């Protein structure tokens, strides 16, 4: 498999050859930044953790150069920050026992550009090498432009595959905007109650972002706990932590369906639900 950037990193925690490590993938996570996978795709990571017949492969598209920095990292150059973020992502791959971790080393500007063909090329190559059953990525309603760029690139990459080779499930996951707003019948509800120690460890790896005052680790665990409690008003909690996802599978089954129209339809469904409950 040839990737666009010679500086792209393919890391296999258990030391297997890259081709074999990618081929064993069952769950694929595709995120924009280092730490996105651990916050949004933990369902796939936990589903594969310690399982002999399941393997999680992570993909981070950007290089980390634009990361915020403060405290001990305040004076770091972009190159130093890229090295820190790459190392943190590798550490998370070891903690989560990923089958493989790929960092594509694109700039955020490249990823969020309307013409991000090189990103699409790399993701298409990865999809062919991994052939996952389930894919986790960002949600189109996310308010971070780089995250939305990843969604566009991933959908375009999947559409390059023959229909028979496409993943069965593609989930858009919440980070910058959660998915509590989705009507319940449209939510993909993912139970991530198991192994809270692993979830916490994965979220806590990214010291360069957390130590500066953004407690992403606490926030993401709080969101999962809140979803578990507020999801159902008339029943006791069936889970202690939940994440919500948007089903993007229709976008990879119908090449004529636009991402914008599909997402707008879900927003319209929320509007209709609200108006119906209010009544006249």
Image: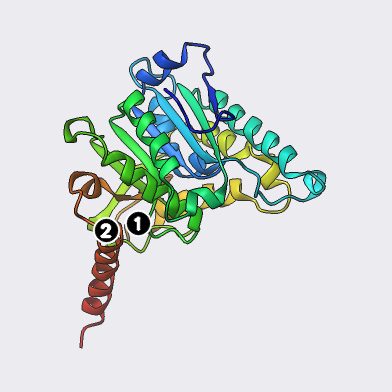
> At 38% from the left edge and 46% from the top edge, which residue is drawn?
153
Could you say whether the residue bearing mark 1 is in a helix, strand or loop?
Answer: loop
Quadrant hosting residue 128:
top left
Image quadrant containing the C terminus: bottom left
Residue placed furthest toward the top? 16
Q: CA distance from mark 2 to mark 1?
A: 8 Å
Check whether the beta carbons of the residues at disc 2 and disc 1 lie within 8 A of each other: yes
Q: What mark, if any, has residue 231 been given in the picture?
A: 1
Give x and y (percent) for residue 44: 39, 34
> Which dot, 2 or 1, sits closer to the camera?
2
Instruction: Answer with left or right where residue 113 lies relative to residue 105.
Output: left
Give the camera-side residue of 235 and 115: 115
Nearer the observer, 53 or 253: 253
Within 10 Å of the Cα at label 2, are there few (<14), some (14-19), or many (20+) other Cα atoms? some
Q: Nearer the viewer, residue 52 or 100?
A: 100
Residue 29 visible within the image: yes
Q: Which residue is mark 2?
A: 184
Residue at 43 percent across and 19 percent down: it is 50
Taking the spot 25% from the left edge, 56% from the top edge, the residue there is 186
Q: Position of residue 73 (x, y in %)?
A: 78, 44
């Amino acid at each position: 498999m040839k990737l666009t950037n010679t500086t792209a990193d393919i890391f296999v925690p258990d030391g297997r050859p890259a081709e074999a490590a990618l081929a064993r993938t069952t769950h694929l996570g595709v995120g924009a930044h280092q730490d996105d996978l651990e916050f949004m795709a933990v369902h796939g990571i936990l589903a594969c953790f310690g399982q002999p017949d399941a393997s999680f492969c992570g993909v981070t598209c950007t290089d980390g150069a634009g990361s915020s920095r403060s405290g001990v990292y305040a004076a770091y150059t972009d190159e130093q920050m890229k090295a820190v973020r790459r190392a943190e992502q590798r550490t998370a791959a070891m903690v989560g026992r990923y089958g493989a971790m790929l960092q594509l080393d694109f700039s955020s500007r490249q990823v969020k550009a309307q013409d991000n063909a090189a990103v699409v090329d790399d993701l298409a190559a990865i999809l062919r090498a991994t052939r996952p059953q389930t894919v986790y990525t960002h949600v189109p309603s996310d308010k971070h432009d780089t995250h939305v760029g990843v969604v566009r690139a991933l959908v375009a990459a999947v559409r390059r595959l023959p229909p028979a080779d496409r993943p069965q499930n593609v989930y858009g996951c919440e980070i910058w905007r959660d998915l509590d707003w989705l009507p319940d019948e449209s939510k993909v509800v993912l139970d991530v109650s198991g192994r809270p120690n692993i979830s916490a460890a994965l979220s806590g790896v990214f010291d360069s972002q957390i130590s500066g005052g953004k407690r992403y680790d606490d926030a993401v665990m709080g969101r999962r706990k809140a979803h578990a409690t507020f999801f159902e008003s008339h029943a006791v909690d069936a889970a202690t932590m939940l994440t919500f996802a948007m089903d993007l599978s229709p976008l990879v089954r119908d090449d004529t369906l636009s991402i914008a129209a599909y997402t707008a339809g879900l927003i319209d469904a929320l509007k209709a639900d609200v108006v119906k409950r209010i009544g006249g």
